[in-house]
Every structure is written in C-alpha cells, then in structure tokens.
Amino acid sequence: MYAASYCRDITRKKLLSLWLAALFLFCGIATGVYGWMELRVDKSTWEYMEYGKLVIGWLGVLFFVTLGIGTAYTALRDAFWPEKSALARSIRSQLPYPDSAPGVQELFAMVDQDIGANGQWFDKVAVGKEWVLGEVACHIPRIRVFFGRDEIRSHRSGERINTTRIIELYILDDRRQSHIMTLNNPRELQPLLDCISLRAPDAICRPYSEYKGWCRKSDMEWENMLREYRVRQGEREMADFRAGSADNVIDQNMTLTGPDGSVTSRVTAELIRQTLLECLRQGEGTFSLAPGRPIEQGEIRFTGLECFVGFYEDLEEPSVQELEELGEAELFMKMTSTGAGQVLQYGRTCQTDVRTAESILQAWFKGELPNLSGWEAVPLTVKQEPVKRRELPPPHLGLMSVSGVFQSHDRFTLEDVEVVAEGMNAGEYQLVDLTMPGGYLWMRIQCGDKTDGRCKVSVTRADADKLRFFRNLCTHKQAASWLMEFARGTFQPDWKEWKDYTRQAEKEFKKK
C-alpha cells in the first residue's frame, strides 16, 4: 500500500460522525421522555390538536432513534470493516469485473498511488491522473457527465431564518452510476471542475439544475450521448497524434493490442504490467506488442510478441504476489525471413512463469530481443487441404423451464424468440440456448435463481483468426434484450465489459 493511505484516512474519519449519531439518539430519547410524561397527564381536556402533536412527537422519536443507529452503524462499519465501506464499494464498482475485484488493500492502493503521485487537492476532494477521491471514488476514464452544485437553502425556525450552503460535486459515469462528493469551501468548486475538465477532456460539464434531467434520460438518449463521447474522444486523440507527429514529440515505436481488442500507441512499462495483471485477475487473457518498425537481425525481422497469461487457482481475491507466483504464461514471437529470394513467416513460442514473461515483455518494449534458444518453432501459415462442401447445420433453440422440462426446436421464427424473451422476463425459464445456422455462433443464457438473481450469458464471436468465447452477468431484462439482438444479427455490445474465456473453453473441448 502507498505510504500515505488517503482511502483509509477517509474511512477512519467516519468515526467523527459518532457525535452526530449521539446527538440524534439524544434528541430521540429526549422526545420520548417528553412524550411519556405527556401520556401520564389528564387527557380529559385534550382536543384533537393535542393528540395530533403527540402522534407527531412519537414519530419524531422513531425517526431520530433510527437515524442515530444508522449513522453509528455506518461510522463503525467504514472505520473497522473498510472492505464494506461506501468508498470500497465505489472503487469496486468502477472495475471491469466488480465480482472478481481484489481485496480492500489493493483497491485502496490503486487510488492511493495515483493520488500520492499525481493528486491535486480541492478542499476535501483530490483529483489524480486516474481517480477522483472524496467520500467515494470515481475512475476518471469512466466520467461522462459531471455537475457542480453551489446552493443556499433557507428554512424558518420560529422567527429565525437559518441558511445552509450546499457545495457538492456530482458525477455520472459510463454505467450511469452516480457519485456525490461534498466540499466545504465554495471557492474550491470551480477550480475542481476545471481540473476534471482537463483530466477528462471528452466529458461534459453541466450546471446542477440539469442533473435530474440527465438521470431521467432514456436508454436511447444515453446511448446517443455515449456514441457522441466516443466520437469526441476519437477526434481528439487523432488530433493529438497528428500534432505530436508534426512536432516530432511522439516517438513511439510500439503499439499494444489489449485483451479486449483495443489498440494504443501510448505504451509504457506500467501499462504493460497493468495489462498483464488485469488478464490474470480476469482468469486469462491475451495481448500483444508490435513495433512500428520491425526489429531486424540479419535476414530475420521480428514483427510482434504475443503474450497469453492464465490464473486457474481457486482463490478468492488473490494478491499480486499470488498472481505472479501461481499464474501461467505463454509467449509467441512472430518472425519473417527474407533470405533465398522468398519470404517465410513463422514464429517461436515458449511457456514460462509470469515474472519471466513480464521481464521479456519489458525488454521487448525497449527494443531488446529475448534469448530464443529453447523456444519451439511454430509455422504461421499452414497449407490446408480443400474441404468438401457440406450443408450448414440448421439453427437450434433449446429451452428449459423452471420445472425442469426441456424443449428442443429446429424450426422456429423470430417471433418465437421474442416470445421466449418475454418468458425470460416473466421468470418462466432457467436456461435458453440459441444457436445460429452453421452451429458455431450461439448464445446461452442461464437465468438467475433465489441465491443469485443475475443471468449468466455466454456467447461466441467469430474473429478473423479464431472463434472466441465471452461471458457476462446481467439482469433478466438485459439478457432478453441481448437474445433478441443476437437473433436479429444486430448484437454489437461493448466487448470491454465481457470476459474472454476462449483458452479455458478450448481446454475443456480438448478434454472431451
């Protein structure tokens, strides 16, 4: 963990709210004592107004006592069980796979390191390179819309008019999650908004009066906003790249293709390590580093290094050390030879441990070739025999009801699939399996039960090089929507939100 744990300081400071809990409990007890004394007096002369005041007083007792107990519980929970705190939950919700997030120490360390190295403080809120930290935390690349609130509220107490000034930062991320952070100094709000605009240049800053309107936007309006965000992001990155190339600022000879298919030329040693650890936390994953100018040695050109890593141990929230010690790695070096008047494409592969793989990747990033002795040669192009034409397997729709009755259909229409989707929303099925013509594109939905209400969706995607397998967890409504899109041929999700388990599926098929 970073030397200064800002996250732990925030959770420990929750203990200061115990005095507020004590105040609420005192008000509740005092109101209760007064109400008890009123119950014992003679009520023969009471009017309806007195009975109404008594009822309101006892409701006040219930309100203050409940509020005091809740405040005390939250303060103690955040201070002594930080993994259950609102801060930890907010960090966990920002990760690609919250259910497989690391332990609270690693969660806090991600934010602490960024704030410690890059943080700028605005009252009680810090803005780093990757995170915004207040009572909760928000990952800056996920910010889509943010709002600054500076309001003065007035309320009358007898003849006095009391005023309260509310200074808050509201953030909506790409998953429509809301993050609220409080400030005390109103002068710090605008500099905070300006800093976030610089760190998230494609996000939208709007006045607080529009906040509720953005929360009520329909799914279609939100998707349009996300599409516009991606367009702005792409245009800005292209403009930055062209400007950097013109000024000869960017001299990057390496591009990284991530496990989700994203490509970046802004490669750093830290990015390589983060990508490797992310693949391990997800169970497995593949990424590659390709130089813009191939590295040449004699008549051989080295054109790319691909890395596959997997972690198959049955451990909950493994640490970085456990990931590095128990993980598996396989490297594949792509090469071409131009000798003897012909071009040959081939490669070499080796299986090793995670730490050795990382050191080879870091050296390759610097333009240094690994020692290939002991690496197994693998051809990149294999001549295939012509395959006899065969009829494509028909589509298939398999259903299992909640009572365990299984149905199999080879002849069905899009309307039939729509009826199945409606049945999923109504909780009529525990399994839906849709296979498209050809037999290789399929979607399988295992509906949730009482223990876990989420649906487990598995789907295949045909890439240029191979058939890939993905899975995700979602609600019944989302699963039904994906089923209809898959049946119509319009299924184009954000694959960054899906877990690639291709290697695991291939191993299971080989066992069969």
Image (spheres, rainbow, N blue to C red):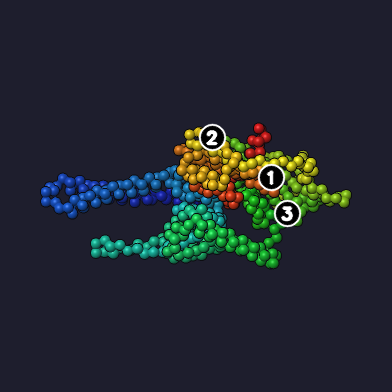
Mark 1: amino acid: Lys
- Specify whether 246 is left or right of 432: right
Mark 2: amino acid: Phe
Name which quarter of the figure residue 412 lies in.
Answer: top right
Q: Please state the horizontal and vertical placement of residue 224, each as a whole percent of the image.
A: 54, 59
- Specify whether 349 is left or right of 42: right
Label 1, label 2: how far apart the Cα atoms are: 31 Å
Q: Residue at x 49, y 43 (%)?
A: 424
- Front residue of 261/265: it is 261
What secondary structure is marked by label 3?
A: strand
Mark 3: amino acid: Pro
- Specify whether 445 is left or right of 156: right
Residue 398 shows in this picture: yes
Residue 103 shows in this picture: no
User: Which numbered dot is residue 466?
Assistant: 1
Q: Quadrant of the C terminus?
A: top right
Q: Residue at x 60, y 50 (%)?
A: 489
Q: Are marks 1 and 2 in contact (CB under 8 Å)?
A: no
Dot 2 alpha-carbon crowd within 10 angstroms: few under 14, some 14 to 19, many 20 or more? few
What secondary structure is marked by label 2?
A: strand
* Disc nearer the start of the sequence (1/2): 2
In this figure, which residue is indicated by the disc labeled 3? Answer: 291
Q: Residue at x 69, y 67 (%)?
A: 246
Q: Is residue 16 above or below residue 152?
A: above
* Disc nearer the start of the sequence (3/2): 3
User: Which numbered dot is residue 406?
Assistant: 2
Q: Are marks 1 and 3 in contact (CB under 8 Å)?
A: no
Q: Residue at x 17, y 46 (%)?
A: 39
